[in-house]
Image: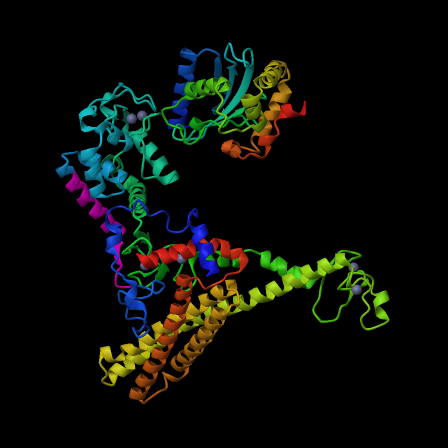
Amino acid sequence: MSSSITPARKRLMKDFKRLQEDPPQGIMGAPVENDIMTWHAVIFGPEGTPFEDGAFKLTLTFTEDYPNKAPVVKFVSRVYHPNVYKDGSICLDILQNKWSPTYNITGILTSIQSLLDEPNPNSPANAEAAQLYRENRREYERKVRDCVEESWSSDEEEEEDEDEDGQDGDDDDDGADGDAPDADKPDAAEQ
Amino acid sequence: MDDEETFMAMSDDEEFPVGGSDDEDFGEDNDDVMVDDDDDDGDDEAMFGVEESGAPTLLVDETQCTFITADELIAQQVHLIKEISSVLQLPHGTARVLLEHFGWSKEQLMERYWTEDHDKLFADARCIQPKDMKDQCDEDMCSICGNDNKEELLQIGCGHGFCHECWVAYLEEKILSQGKQSIECPEYNCNILVDESTVTSLLKGPAHAETLARYYERVADAIVDSKKTMRWCPAPDCKFAVIAPHSKCKMVKCKCGFEFCFQCGQENHTPVLCLMLKAWLKKCADDSETSNWLQAHTKPCPKCASVIEKNGGCNHMSCRKCKHEFCWICLGDWEPHGSSWFNCTRFNDSETAVVREKVDASRSLLKRYLFYFDRFKNHQSSRQFEEKLVKAVDWKMKQMQKQGWGWVEVQFLIQAVATLQQARRVLQYTYVFAYYLKKTPQCLIFEENQADLQMQTERLSEYLEQRAAKMDDLHNLKQQVMNLRAYCEHRLQKLVEHVEEGYKVGFWEYDEKIAEEMVGQVDEFNESLEL
Ligand SMILES: [Zn+2]
Ligand SMILES: [Zn+2]
Ligand SMILES: [Zn+2]
Ligand SMILES: [Zn+2]
Ligand SMILES: [Zn+2]
Ligand SMILES: [Zn+2]
């Protein structure tokens, strides 16, 4: 099967082409070498937001059901955000019940990019971040800046990156359902 | 009466889990359909089985239900769509989406169609108005796969075009993976519904037969779900949906013969209410009972913690593993106890008293549960056993016909078996009822009724099982069987009526744990009597 070009692969190549020809501001992405079903991407924090200057890495994992089923999208970099779980899973409607097959990779990544500065505090994946976002914006922004800085420093540690990739496979998929065990204990709380 | 007041006081803000809110019933299940009045069910003379309009609500009302298969439902629906389509001058697909939006009620749709703003009405129904329907795709390319062969693109009035292949893959995902029949346009942010005829034409051919069949199953399910007076028969392999005369119907009998509760979908569970049964079934399934048993009958050895089971009455325990000797009551060393027959030094110690109480309480609770569970199970297995009677009786009936009896004349035998099965089933559930009941004087009457019914049931059962096959004096046999059946039915009727009266008047008192939940159910039950 892997040798024939399935509709999912065909579509992913099209997505790749579109992303290269017409890259949106602050977004990069490409399939992993020899595996078009797995993508690495980087989202730069939008200017004028606390996420500015951050370079957040993500992985996207597709199945042969793409684009009828959404890919699994996870942050590899630590992101302090009300809708991002500790394991990097993202709580975003278009990746779940609002998914439409007309979405493509550009659409997914731009939606995540705009989610950064427009969190949805009603479906918190990180309860502390959601609370600070509502009640103590200064502290919230301070913690966001911490992870922005981290996003650059961890860039040099390629091995750590690999490690985190490996972990992704274990606690996959269901992280974004709103009840991940880690939801209440974001990393930043330990600092 | 105290209880009644409590019921009244709490009923206002109770949400009833069973039956749903019926305020918005559509079309045919209006209150006036129900013609029962309570006045003529006061007396017990009407034999059970001869259901009349005044039959107790807890007994099956066979006469008032109708039955429909999925195919018939869909055919009815097609008919309705055609009608609406021609009356309102709408395309079929549009008529269908609107009808579904209004719960398949023609009246609702007609009324709202003539009184409401069409922009809003169509938007709410997720449907494009005929005047706004596009006849071309907005773009020359399938926005799922990028296919730019214009000829292959298909849109459903909203202008979002997709190629055939992408449509089919999308529908398969929605129908097979997500089990949906209400399917929106694939375009992000477009909520226009894909109408049935589009689905049917896209899923043409043997390759999609299974998907299409699933789709129609879901369609039929959705129709049944939308009607508060319809429910699929839960019997395995039964294809019928039962249409009840009103949404509060309790026990119904399907065309296939299976009797079930229209509210909770379980087998006919007269005389208990749904909530009691639910609590009971949960209790039976929970292994908490097992742990109760363990708590009552076992203790860890105070020295090595291995589990010791107490099986005799003696409190002098010795651990099989470490040979430690201790007192079952206080868990202390046996040594100081040994000198006299009972010299438990810590017997009155408050801490051990608590432990002891806990053990005693769980032991007596468990005993109680096991008592009822045992009888519940006994009747259940008797019922399974008596299934065989149907065959035996069938044989006997054939024999009798060979000897010149008419078909009608031998029906008494199979009717007697039916009564027996019914009585067994009711008996089985009386033990659930009794388990949750507080011992009030009314409860004693109930237990008497239960014992009477049990006796008559056993007599009928014994006669049918042991004697009927051997009896040569057929006229005598018929007389005996008919008498026994009549007694049994009479007792059954008595028991059920008494339980019902208790619900109505409010003289039952329940175990605390269940009482609170029962409030809503009893109210609802009474409500259904007043219909
Ligand atoms: Zn296409
Ligand atoms: Zn559309
Ligand atoms: Zn049936
Ligand atoms: Zn029920
Ligand atoms: Zn021991
Ligand atoms: Zn003792």
x and y percent of residue B88 in the render?
A: 15, 36
* Residue B235 in sight in this render: no
Residue B72 magenta = yes
B239 left or right of B315?
A: left
Residue B91 located within the stretch drawn in magenta: no
Q: Residue at x 36, y 81 (%)?
A: B484
The answer to whether residue A191 is left or right of residue B17 is right
Query: Which quarter of the figure has residue B400?
Result: bottom left
**Who is closer to the viewer here, B107 or A120?**
B107
Residue at 24%, 55% in the rendered image: B33
x, y percent for residue B338: 84, 69
Does any portion of residue B404 appear in the rendered image? yes
Q: Quadrant of ligand 2?
A: top left
What secondary structure prevails in the magenta region?
helix
**Magenta residue span:** B62-84
Residue nearer the viewer, A171 or B115: B115
* Place of residue B445 in the rendered image (x, y in percent of width and height, measured from the top left): 46, 73
**At 37% across and 86% down in the image, what residue appears?**
B470
**From the image, which quarter does the C terminus of chain A lie in?**
top right
Q: Position of residue A153 (x, y in %)?
A: 63, 14
Q: Quadrant of the N terminus of chain A?
A: top left
Question: What colouring method underlies this structural image?
Answer: rainbow
Q: Using the image as rendered, state which of residue A15 and residue A101 is in the foreground.
A: A101
